[in-house]
Image: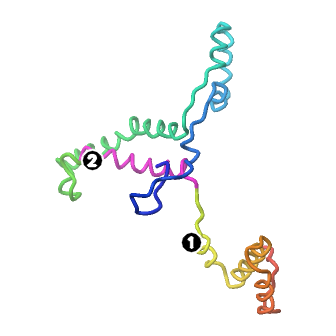
Amino acid sequence: MTCPRKDLTVFKGLECTPDEVYVPTTYGLADIAALLPRALSAYLSLLAERLPAAVRSLLEDFSFTVAPIQWHALSLASFASIIAPFGGFFASGFKRAFRMKDFGDTIPGHGGVTDRFDCQILMAVFAYCYYYSYISKPEVTLGDVLLMATKLNDHDQILLFGKMGNLLAGEGLIPEGIMDSLRRHLGNRFTWEVPDS
Protein backbone atom coordinates (compact mmCIF):
# COMPACT_ATOMS: atom_id res chain seq x y z
CA MET A 1 0.00 0.00 0.00
CA THR A 2 2.75 2.46 0.82
CA CYS A 3 4.72 1.64 -2.34
CA PRO A 4 2.33 0.63 -5.12
CA ARG A 5 3.82 -1.77 -7.66
CA LYS A 6 3.93 -0.34 -11.18
CA ASP A 7 5.00 -3.54 -12.96
CA LEU A 8 4.49 -7.30 -12.71
CA THR A 9 7.97 -8.31 -11.55
CA VAL A 10 8.30 -9.90 -8.12
CA PHE A 11 12.10 -9.84 -7.88
CA LYS A 12 12.49 -6.08 -8.09
CA GLY A 13 12.48 -4.31 -4.73
CA LEU A 14 9.95 -1.69 -3.74
CA GLU A 15 11.54 1.73 -3.44
CA CYS A 16 9.50 4.90 -3.22
CA THR A 17 8.86 7.94 -1.12
CA PRO A 18 5.88 7.10 1.10
CA ASP A 19 2.77 9.18 0.56
CA GLU A 20 2.22 11.83 3.24
CA VAL A 21 -0.77 9.88 4.53
CA TYR A 22 1.68 7.20 5.81
CA VAL A 23 4.15 9.60 7.43
CA PRO A 24 3.68 9.83 11.21
CA THR A 25 2.78 13.28 12.57
CA THR A 26 3.02 14.50 16.16
CA TYR A 27 -0.11 16.08 17.62
CA GLY A 28 -0.54 18.03 20.84
CA LEU A 29 -3.77 18.77 22.67
CA ALA A 30 -3.81 22.26 21.12
CA ASP A 31 -3.87 20.65 17.65
CA ILE A 32 -6.81 18.46 18.65
CA ALA A 33 -8.64 21.43 20.22
CA ALA A 34 -8.33 23.32 16.92
CA LEU A 35 -10.26 20.52 15.19
CA LEU A 36 -13.12 20.52 17.72
CA PRO A 37 -16.19 22.74 17.45
CA ARG A 38 -15.61 26.17 19.01
CA ALA A 39 -18.18 25.68 21.81
CA LEU A 40 -16.68 22.35 22.86
CA SER A 41 -13.16 23.76 22.72
CA ALA A 42 -14.19 26.73 24.92
CA TYR A 43 -15.86 24.37 27.41
CA LEU A 44 -12.76 22.16 27.61
CA SER A 45 -10.48 25.18 28.15
CA LEU A 46 -12.72 26.35 31.02
CA LEU A 47 -12.57 22.85 32.46
CA ALA A 48 -8.77 22.80 32.11
CA GLU A 49 -8.47 26.08 34.05
CA ARG A 50 -10.03 24.39 37.08
CA LEU A 51 -7.43 21.62 37.11
CA PRO A 52 -4.41 21.81 39.42
CA ALA A 53 -1.33 23.47 37.91
CA ALA A 54 0.67 20.21 37.85
CA VAL A 55 -2.05 18.41 35.87
CA ARG A 56 -2.41 21.39 33.51
CA SER A 57 1.34 21.34 32.89
CA LEU A 58 1.22 17.63 32.05
CA LEU A 59 -1.68 18.18 29.65
CA GLU A 60 0.13 21.06 27.90
CA ASP A 61 3.18 18.85 27.34
CA PHE A 62 1.15 15.82 26.24
CA SER A 63 1.61 14.80 22.61
CA PHE A 64 1.24 11.66 20.56
CA THR A 65 2.47 10.54 17.16
CA VAL A 66 0.18 8.93 14.63
CA ALA A 67 0.09 8.57 10.85
CA PRO A 68 -2.92 10.17 9.13
CA ILE A 69 -3.86 6.77 7.66
CA GLN A 70 -4.54 5.63 11.23
CA TRP A 71 -7.21 8.33 11.57
CA HIS A 72 -8.74 7.05 8.34
CA ALA A 73 -8.60 3.49 9.68
CA LEU A 74 -10.46 4.68 12.77
CA SER A 75 -13.21 6.12 10.55
CA LEU A 76 -13.47 2.93 8.52
CA ALA A 77 -13.52 0.77 11.67
CA SER A 78 -16.24 2.93 13.23
CA PHE A 79 -18.40 2.59 10.14
CA ALA A 80 -17.74 -1.17 10.00
CA SER A 81 -18.81 -1.69 13.59
CA ILE A 82 -21.73 0.75 13.80
CA ILE A 83 -23.33 1.10 10.35
CA ALA A 84 -22.27 -1.88 8.18
CA PRO A 85 -24.17 -4.53 10.22
CA PHE A 86 -27.39 -2.87 9.08
CA GLY A 87 -26.66 -4.29 5.62
CA GLY A 88 -27.08 -7.75 7.12
CA PHE A 89 -30.19 -6.66 9.04
CA PHE A 90 -31.69 -5.30 5.83
CA ALA A 91 -30.97 -8.55 3.96
CA SER A 92 -32.45 -10.57 6.81
CA GLY A 93 -35.62 -8.46 6.83
CA PHE A 94 -35.85 -8.74 3.06
CA LYS A 95 -35.66 -12.55 3.26
CA ARG A 96 -38.31 -12.66 6.01
CA ALA A 97 -40.67 -10.46 4.02
CA PHE A 98 -40.48 -12.80 1.04
CA ARG A 99 -40.33 -15.98 3.17
CA MET A 100 -36.96 -17.04 1.76
CA LYS A 101 -34.49 -19.29 3.57
CA ASP A 102 -31.49 -17.68 1.88
CA PHE A 103 -30.52 -15.98 -1.37
CA GLY A 104 -29.23 -19.23 -2.90
CA ASP A 105 -32.07 -19.45 -5.42
CA THR A 106 -32.05 -15.75 -6.35
CA ILE A 107 -28.37 -14.82 -6.43
CA PRO A 108 -26.13 -17.56 -7.93
CA GLY A 109 -23.50 -18.74 -5.48
CA HIS A 110 -25.27 -17.02 -2.60
CA GLY A 111 -26.76 -18.75 0.41
CA GLY A 112 -25.70 -20.42 3.62
CA VAL A 113 -22.34 -19.02 4.72
CA THR A 114 -22.30 -16.28 2.07
CA ASP A 115 -25.53 -14.85 3.50
CA ARG A 116 -23.44 -13.79 6.50
CA PHE A 117 -21.42 -11.41 4.32
CA ASP A 118 -24.22 -9.07 3.26
CA CYS A 119 -22.81 -6.27 5.40
CA GLN A 120 -19.65 -6.42 3.27
CA ILE A 121 -21.55 -4.88 0.36
CA LEU A 122 -22.37 -1.82 2.44
CA MET A 123 -18.82 -1.67 3.77
CA ALA A 124 -17.30 -1.98 0.29
CA VAL A 125 -19.36 0.93 -1.04
CA PHE A 126 -18.42 3.08 1.96
CA ALA A 127 -14.70 2.20 1.73
CA TYR A 128 -14.64 3.01 -2.00
CA CYS A 129 -16.39 6.37 -1.54
CA TYR A 130 -14.27 7.23 1.52
CA TYR A 131 -11.01 6.42 -0.24
CA TYR A 132 -11.77 8.49 -3.32
CA SER A 133 -13.22 11.37 -1.27
CA TYR A 134 -10.65 11.73 1.53
CA ILE A 135 -7.50 9.69 0.95
CA SER A 136 -6.57 9.50 -2.73
CA LYS A 137 -5.17 12.48 -4.54
CA PRO A 138 -6.47 13.16 -8.03
CA GLU A 139 -3.78 12.48 -10.60
CA VAL A 140 -3.96 13.90 -14.09
CA THR A 141 -2.38 11.57 -16.62
CA LEU A 142 -1.27 12.31 -20.14
CA GLY A 143 -4.20 10.25 -21.38
CA ASP A 144 -6.64 12.45 -19.43
CA VAL A 145 -5.14 15.61 -20.91
CA LEU A 146 -5.20 14.21 -24.45
CA LEU A 147 -8.82 13.11 -24.03
CA MET A 148 -9.79 16.63 -22.96
CA ALA A 149 -7.77 18.17 -25.79
CA THR A 150 -9.51 16.04 -28.43
CA LYS A 151 -12.87 17.36 -27.21
CA LEU A 152 -11.85 20.92 -28.19
CA ASN A 153 -12.83 22.34 -31.59
CA ASP A 154 -10.16 22.55 -34.33
CA HIS A 155 -9.27 26.19 -33.66
CA ASP A 156 -8.83 25.60 -29.92
CA GLN A 157 -6.74 22.46 -30.52
CA ILE A 158 -4.31 24.43 -32.70
CA LEU A 159 -4.34 27.25 -30.14
CA LEU A 160 -3.51 24.75 -27.36
CA PHE A 161 -0.76 23.29 -29.52
CA GLY A 162 0.69 26.75 -30.10
CA LYS A 163 0.51 27.74 -26.43
CA MET A 164 2.15 24.47 -25.36
CA GLY A 165 4.82 24.99 -28.02
CA ASN A 166 5.52 28.50 -26.72
CA LEU A 167 5.74 27.15 -23.18
CA LEU A 168 8.12 24.35 -24.18
CA ALA A 169 10.24 26.68 -26.32
CA GLY A 170 10.42 29.15 -23.43
CA GLU A 171 11.66 26.36 -21.16
CA GLY A 172 14.23 25.36 -23.79
CA LEU A 173 12.73 21.88 -24.23
CA ILE A 174 12.10 22.31 -27.97
CA PRO A 175 13.86 24.54 -30.52
CA GLU A 176 12.28 27.95 -31.17
CA GLY A 177 12.44 27.19 -34.91
CA ILE A 178 9.54 24.75 -34.56
CA MET A 179 7.23 27.56 -33.45
CA ASP A 180 8.47 29.86 -36.23
CA SER A 181 7.78 27.11 -38.77
CA LEU A 182 4.27 26.60 -37.37
CA ARG A 183 3.50 30.33 -37.60
CA ARG A 184 4.79 30.45 -41.20
CA HIS A 185 2.76 27.36 -42.15
CA LEU A 186 -0.51 28.65 -40.69
CA GLY A 187 0.06 32.22 -41.89
CA ASN A 188 -2.99 34.47 -41.79
CA ARG A 189 -5.45 31.57 -41.67
CA PHE A 190 -5.14 31.33 -37.92
CA THR A 191 -5.16 33.81 -35.06
CA TRP A 192 -3.08 33.09 -31.97
CA GLU A 193 -5.28 35.21 -29.76
CA VAL A 194 -7.23 33.49 -27.00
CA PRO A 195 -10.98 34.25 -27.28
CA ASP A 196 -12.71 35.98 -24.35
CA SER A 197 -15.04 33.07 -23.53
Q: Is residue 8 above or below residue 183?
A: above
Residue at position x 69%, y 12% in the image: 49
Magenta stretch encompasses residue 116: yes
The amino acid at mark 1 is: Gly
Q: Is residue 27 left or right of residue 10?
A: right
Q: Which residues are magenta?
A: 115-137
Mark 1: secondary structure: helix
The circle drawn on residue 143 is 1
Q: Amino acid at mark 2?
A: Phe
Q: Where does residue 4 sit, x and y in percent of width and height? A: 48, 54
Name the quadrant of the C terminus: bottom right
**SS category of the residue bearing label 2:** helix
The answer to whether residue 94 is above or below residue 108 is above
14 in the magenta segment: no
Front-most of 96 and 131? 131
Callout 2: few (<14), some (14-19), or many (20+) C-alpha neighbours within 10 Å? Answer: few
The numbered dot on residue 77 is none
Report whether 9 appears left or right of 3. Answer: left
Q: Main secondary structure of the magenta part?
A: helix
In space, the residues marked 2 and 1 are separated at their CA atoms by 44 Å
Q: Quadrant of residue 68?
A: top right
